[in-house]
Amino acid sequence: MWNKKARAIPVRLNSANQWYPLPYGSVDEPIEHVDCLDELVKSYVRCQIPLKGALLRMPIASGEYEQRGIGVNAIKGENTVPTEEMWQAVKRHPEASSRLRSRCAPRPLQCLPYYHGTLFPEGAEDLLKFDGQFLLYCNKSNGALMVAACKHFYGIETKVHREIRKSSREGYFYIKSHDKKLKYTTAEDLILYYITYGIPLEGNSEATEKRTNESVIFHEPVVNLQLARHVLLEPAANTQDLKYYYSEMDDQTASRLLRKEGDYLLRVQYNGQLLVSVKWNGQVHNLDAPESNDLGMYVLPRSDASYPPEEVSNLDEYVKSMVVHQIPWSGVVLRRAITKTKIAIC
């Protein structure tokens, strides 16, 4: 159900391998997949990724759901990680991947907070400051998906880059060749495996992984702060000073600037009407901007008329509230402001 209309949305299945591909943010990113429809659907729900012009929120269950316990899987205080035993455990328990995620649905690469998009290796290294920090990025030189990590040992700083590869036949992600035995079909599961079991990033041994004081171990992800720029309020004195406000913009120009689902901007139409233009389901929708009340306040939308009215003091607060909570607005959802600054358009 979306915008008060029931819809049937087809789901793509790779018939050759019986896989469900996860959505991706760029053609440069590797295709990730899951093995069951529930993981695919819950991934869309968890990350609030648009699906044919709709956001999935809440399932309508047909029966009772039995909540299963979450197993303890971390190995602590050992110098040797028994990877062979872990491979056998994964083979016996197909839910091992979801247990690493505490039974949460997998997140595609574009939704990982420690994925920094396309960078040169030097740019990735500039973000690594402390021992155990790590991040993912796509190498701007060759398009390879990389993990970079930092190690400090006796005053010596080491920054290691390893490629996250994908086997061409099975579609499994791996850093070291024997990682393929774990059959991870998303980059997140592979990284969680390295974090949970303290797997050293260096080396490529088969039987065991030796941890030493010099080993590069993932401890702290470096969060991509650019993810927050779409919800931060602007220090603008009035609406005309907002970076995503455009005066006298025509429909063709707005359509050219709004490229991705949820891209939006404020613009003044030729008749002086202030519009919120949003790209949604492949089309540009033009919504009338809300007007302030007699006190200059903007009333936030309510899902239930019995709730008390809430107000914000300016249009930027109103818009960013819609973005933060992904509130449908006449059937569309705002996600990314297209501003006049280069950093927000790239």
Image (tube, rainbow, N blue to C red):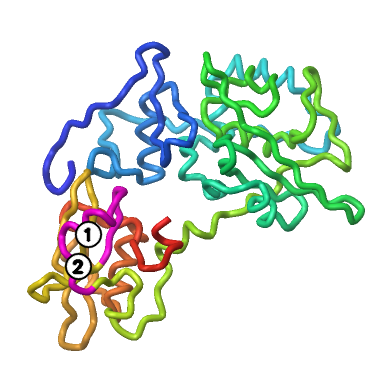
Outermost residue on the left side: it is 271
Which picture quadrant has residue 47?
A: top left
Residue type at tag 2: Met
Among all residues in the image, which is located at the extreme right? Answer: 154
Say which element carries label 1. helix
The residue shown at (83%, 52%) is 157
Per the rendering, the mark at residue 171 is: none
The stretch of residues the image draws in magenta is 247-265
Task: Residue 254: give its label.
Answer: 1
- Where is 258 relative to 311, above or below? above
Q: Nearer the viewer, residue 216 or 7?
A: 216
Residue 323 is left or right of residue 282, and the answer is: right
Q: Where does the image place residue 135, in percent across and percent down from the top left?
A: 63, 47
Magenta-span inclusion, residue 257? yes
Badge 1 density bin: few <14, some 14–19, many ≥20, Cα 10 Å: many
| Residues at discs 2 and 1 in contact (Cβ within 8 Å) | yes
Tell me the quarter of the image containing the N terminus. Answer: top left
Q: Amino acid at mark 1?
A: Ala
Magenta residue check for 219: no
Cα–Cα gap, marks 2 and 1: 7 Å
Residue beneath the point at 53% across and 24% down: 95
Which residue is at 44% across, 25% downward? Answer: 34
State left or right for residue 215 relative to residue 235: right
Point out which mark residue 249 bears: 2
Residue positioned 30% across, 24% down in the render: 12
Up/down of 237 relative to 220, above or below = below
Q: What secondary structure is found at the residue carrying circle 2?
A: loop
Residue 147, quarter of picture: top right
Where does the image place residue 98, in percent across and percent down from the top left? Answer: 52, 31
